[in-house]
Amino acid sequence: MKEERSSSAASPGEGRDIGHVRAVQRAARIVTALTEHPYPMGIVELAKFVQLSPGSVHRLLATLVNVGWVAQNSRTSKYHLGMGAVGLGSVALVTNPVVHDGRMYLSRIAQWSGHDAVLSTLVGAKTVQLARSAGVNTELIEFEPGHPQPAHAMADGKLLLAYLPEDEVGDILGPEELRRFTPNTITDPDRMRREFATIRAQGYCVDNYERFDTGRGIAVPVLDPGGRPLAAMMCLGKLDPAKDGELVQQLQSVAREMSDRLNATGDLPASGFEPAQFPAAGGDAPGAVPSDPGRG
C-alpha cells in the first residue's frame, strides 16, 4: 500500500519509473525462485513462492521467456531457468572480479589449512559456491559451481542469512521446522534466530556437522565498502575444533585483504544487505576477532 500511495503522489513520469522498478524487482524475485528451487515450477506454485498474483507472474514470465532468461517445458507447461540465464551465470563465474580474485585467496587458505576453501553467495534460501580451492585433506563431496546447498545447514549460509532484513529472514525460515540433514542440524526457526544473533556478535559462523556427518565448516564475511557482507569465505572439512580460533583469524585476515584489494581497484560492489540490520561498531561488527572461537 505504501508503494501505491507513493506512485499516486508522483508525477506521471516518476510514476512510470516506479512501476518499471517494481516490475524489475518482481522479475528478479521470479528468477531467484527458479534458481533456488530444484525442479521446474508452475505458475500457481511460483506465485505462492514469490507472493504475487498468478496473473502478475504470468505476465512477467512471458517477458522473461522472451529474453531467454526463463524457459517453459512444452509438455508440462512448467518453468525453469533458460539458456540466457545459464550463459550469463557462466560468464560471470569467469569474469566477475570478486570470483576471479577470490580464487587466489582461497588457494592460500587451502594451502595453509589443508582443507577446502570456498567462496559463496546467497540465492534465496540456498548458498551457491562460486569458487573452491581443494586442500590436501579433501574428503567431502566434489565441487560443482552453481550447485545450491541449504543455507540454514551450512556455515556460509547461516553467516549470510544472519545479516538479512527480518522480513526476508521470516520468509526463509517460515513458521515450520527446517529440513534436517544430520542430528546436529538446527531446524527450529526460533533457535536459528538466536544462532543469527550469536553470528552477528562474534563476526563469524561455525556449522558443527550440520550439513554433512563427515565435515564441518567455518565462514567469515567478505565485506563491501560499507562493511556489509558481500560474500562468504569458508573453510570446509574435518576441522579440528581446537584450532578454530587460529583458523577464524586466518580467514578474517585473508577476507579483509581481499576486500581491501578489490576496493582499491574499484571492483568491490556494494552488498544488497541492509546496513540498518547490522550491529553497531565496538566489537560486534562482522569480521571482529572472536573472543570465544568454540561457539557456534
Image (cartoon, rainbow, N blue to C red):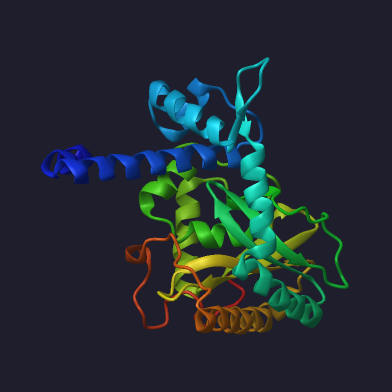
Look at the image and tell me in which quarter the N terminus lies. Answer: top left
Q: Quadrant of the C terminus?
A: bottom right
Q: Is residue 250 left or right of residue 52?
A: right
Could one spot residue 290 in this view of the protein? no
Q: Image quadrant of residue 250?
A: bottom right
Image coordinates of residue 118 in percent, x first then y, are 70, 66
234 on left or right of 275: right
Name the one closer to the observer, 165 or 144.
144
Residue 173: x and y in percent read 48, 44
| Residue at image location 65% in from the left, 16% down from the top | 76
Tell me if residue 77 comes above or below residue 138 in the rendering.
Answer: above
Place of residue 253 in the rendered image (x, y in percent of width and height, measured from the top left): 60, 84
Residue 25 location, x and y as percent?
A: 40, 44
Q: Identify whether 214 is placed above or below 269.
A: above
Q: Residue furthest left?
A: 9
Give the image quarter of residue 233: bottom right
Q: Is residue 279 left or right of residue 100?
A: left
| Residue closer to the observer: 118 or 240 | 118
Q: How many marks?
A: 0
Residue 131 in the image: above or below residue 212? below
Residue occupying the point 69% across, 51% down:
146
Q: Is residue 21 above or below residue 157?
A: above
Residue 79 in view here: yes
Q: Quadrant of residue 241?
A: bottom right
- Image point 67% across, 44% down: which residue? 86
Residue at the spot x=81%, y=80% of the render? 111
